[in-house]
Image (tube, coloured by chain):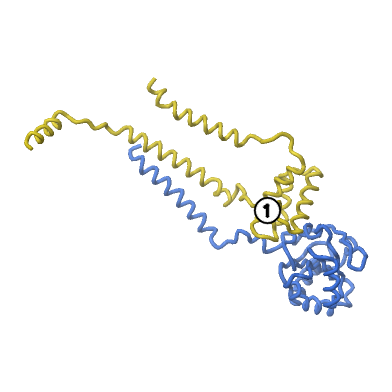
């Protein structure tokens, strides 16, 4: 080795160059991009059985063959209250559609607060409680509101993190029914 | 004998490094309970509804539910790796607090090792270079020059 210092400097330079190339190729990519969309889309809906606010029980099995909008929400979440008019409007437009179910699943709230929110906001669709947050974990939720639309084939066709709109719900339901 | 004296410190250093790695890699403790194993997995997974906390350290209801889920999976016979994979499958790689040792995440592990190897190599080269430099000793001509200069003062 005639010039060892040059070899060392050259090796360091190569490592730095390789690092620069790798970083340049990955520049602009969000390392947490997978946190923007549910990985459950395209997979069968996780099995769940939940108590409803009116004392009954609702399960994924009992909803088979229907298009189901599952909306995770709670009474203290401001974005959940923001999306409420859209959900109410959508629900009002589809009350005669017996193949469509809108199911609100309460995430991280007390029964009394939920009852008050349902009463005060005139929520007419089925509200299910999630004791132990088992459904929230099964759906791999990251917060609330989150909306999932399950097609009649029992597959999650679309998902949304954050407040929804009537137009978004229309598109999600169309995607779910398009699968069948 | 000279060669032995030269290489003995390096050999000793190598032995110490191997011993330190062995101690670090040796599984600590004896039998690990389900709770120990659950805690180990929970501490590697990110709490999804809070910032920079593990599932183990978070107090959210979601994290509590995930802790229960992890424990029930382990009780059902899943290994820690299977539980980790199940969470990455459902939430994506960003659920992991520590980068994976593949793809770009590999850089995080490889770079310090690369830097260490390069540094050690550089140091070895520099030491050899310094050692091979001739020791400067005054020649008789130098000594005569100094003597003459002193006498001239």
Q: Quadrant of residue A69?
A: bottom right
**A128 lies left or right of B57:** right
Q: Residue furthest top?
A: B1
Q: Classify the position of the C terminus of chain A by image quarter.
A: bottom right
Q: Classify the position of the N terminus of chain A by image quarter.
A: top left
Q: Residue A121 location in percent, x, y?
A: 82, 77
Chain that is yellow in the image? B
Q: Residue B72 location in percent, x, y?
A: 80, 48
Q: Quadrant of residue A96?
A: bottom right
SS at mark 1 in the image: loop
Camera sees residue B88: no
Task: Work out whether A88 lies above or below A68.
Answer: below
Camera sees residue A92: yes
Please tell me how crowded label 1 is: few (under 14), some (14-19), or many (20+) other residues with Cα within 10 Å: many
The residue at which mark 1 appears reads as B54
Q: Chain of mark 1?
A: B
Task: Work out whether B129 lies above or below A38.
Answer: above
Q: Residue at x 22, y 30 (%)?
A: B137
Q: Residue A139 location in percent, x, y?
A: 77, 60
Q: Residue at x 50, y 31 (%)?
A: B14
Task: Work out whether A61 lies above or below B39.
Answer: below
Q: Residue B77 location in percent, x, y?
A: 80, 42
Q: Residue at x 44, y 26 (%)?
A: B8
Chain that is blue in the image? A
Q: Residue at x 60, y 58 (%)?
A: A31
**B150 lies left or right of A89:** left
């Amino acid at each position: 080795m005639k010039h060892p210092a040059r070899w060392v400097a050259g090796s360091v330079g190569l490592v730095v160059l390789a690092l620069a190339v790798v970083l340049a190729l990955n520049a602009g990519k969000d390392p947490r991009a997978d946190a923007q969309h549910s990985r459950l889309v395209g997979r069968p809906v996780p099995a769940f059985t939940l108590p409803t606010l009116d004392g009954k029980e609702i399960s994924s099995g009992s909803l088979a063959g229907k298009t189901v909008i599952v909306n995770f929400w709670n009474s203290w979440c401001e974005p959940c209250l923001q999306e409420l008019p859209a959900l109410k409007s959508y629900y009002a437009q589809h009350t005669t559609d017996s193949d469509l179910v809108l199911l609100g699943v309460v995430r991280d709230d007390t029964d009394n607060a939920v009852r008050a929110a349902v009463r005060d906001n005139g929520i007419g669709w089925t509200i299910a409680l999630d004791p132990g947050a088992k459904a929230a974990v099964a759906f791999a939720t990251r917060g609330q509101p989150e909306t999932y639309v399950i097609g009649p084939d029992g597959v999650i066709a679309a998902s949304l993190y954050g407040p929804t709109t009537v137009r978004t719900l229309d598109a999600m339901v169309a995607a779910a029914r398009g699968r069948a | 004998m000279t060669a032995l004296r030269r290489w003995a410190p390096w050999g000793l250093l190598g032995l110490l490094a191997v011993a330190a790695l062995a101690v670090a890699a040796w599984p600590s403790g004896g039998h690990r309970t389900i709770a120990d194993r659950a805690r180990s997995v929970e501490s590697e997974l990110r709490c999804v509804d809070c910032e920079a906390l593990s599932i183990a350290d978070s107090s959210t209801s979601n994290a509590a539910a995930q802790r229960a889920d992890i424990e029930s999976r382990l009780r059902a016979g899943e290994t820690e790796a299977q539980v980790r994979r199940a969470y990455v499958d459902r939430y994506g790689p960003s659920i992991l607090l520590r980068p994976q040792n593949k793809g770009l995440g590999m850089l995080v592990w490889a770079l310090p090792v690369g830097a260490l190897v390069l540094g050690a190599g550089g140091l070895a080269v520099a030491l050899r270079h310094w050692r091979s430099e001739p020791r400067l000793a005054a020649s008789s001509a130098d000594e005569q020059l100094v003597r003459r200069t002193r006498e001239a003062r």
